[in-house]
Amino acid sequence: MLDIAEVAEKSGLAPSALRFYEKKGLLTSSGRNGLRRTYEPEVLQRLTLINCARRAGFSVAEIRRFLVAKAGDAALEATIAEKVAVLGEDIARLQRMRESLEHASTCTHEPLVECPDFKRMLAP
């Protein structure tokens, strides 16, 4: 068993975030050790999923729904398909930005942002 301070330290989240996620139904504590919440070690894997989903733009409600979903949930499948499309666009945009910055790191054009190659790389 891990107490809330250990989970916070290992996950990099504040204890208040853990309590928030628990209140929203994303986490379940196993009980208490004195006044401190305790969690099963598997909570760290769940927090990895939650953090990844949050960074990918999922709302807390979307994550909660995903965590309890069963195969064949048509509405959830539609939401996931939308997220896949958005993530694909984000990945493409970030790759263009990375390539542009790599070019910018060696470009001698003045001003840099007017470089035709830099502009071309940023274009969708």
Image (cartoon, helix red, strand yellow):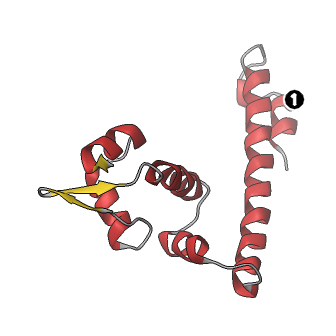
- Residue at far front of view: 1
In this view, the residue in front, 49 or 39, is 39
Say whether residue 86 is left or right of residue 39: right
Say whether residue 46 is left or right of residue 114: left
State whether residue 108 is above or below residue 36. Answer: above
Amino acid identity at mark 1: Asp
In this view, the residue in front, 73 or 123, is 73
Mark 1: few/some/many CA within 10 Å (<14, 14-19, 20+): some
Picture quadrant where residue 36 is located? bottom left
* Residue 35 seen in this snapshot: yes
At a point 74% along the width and 78% down the height, the residue shown is 71
State whether residue 88 is above or below residue 120. Answer: below
Picture quadrant where residue 111 is located? top right
- Residue at far bottom of view: 74
In this view, the residue in front, 114 or 103, is 103
Q: Which residue is mark 1?
A: 117
Image spot of residue 105 (x, y percent): 72, 17
At a point 38% along the width and 64% down the height, the residue shown is 21
- Residue at far left of view: 34
Image spot of residue 33 (x, y percent): 18, 54
Image spot of residue 52 (x, y percent): 58, 52
Say whether residue 10 is left or right of residue 69: left
Image spot of residue 123 (x, y percent): 84, 45
At a point 32% along the width and 62% down the height, the residue shown is 30
State whether residue 100 is above or below residue 40. Answer: above
Say whether residue 54 is left or right of residue 85: left
At a point 58% along the width and 65% down the height, the residue shown is 58
State whether residue 23 is above or below residue 111. Answer: below
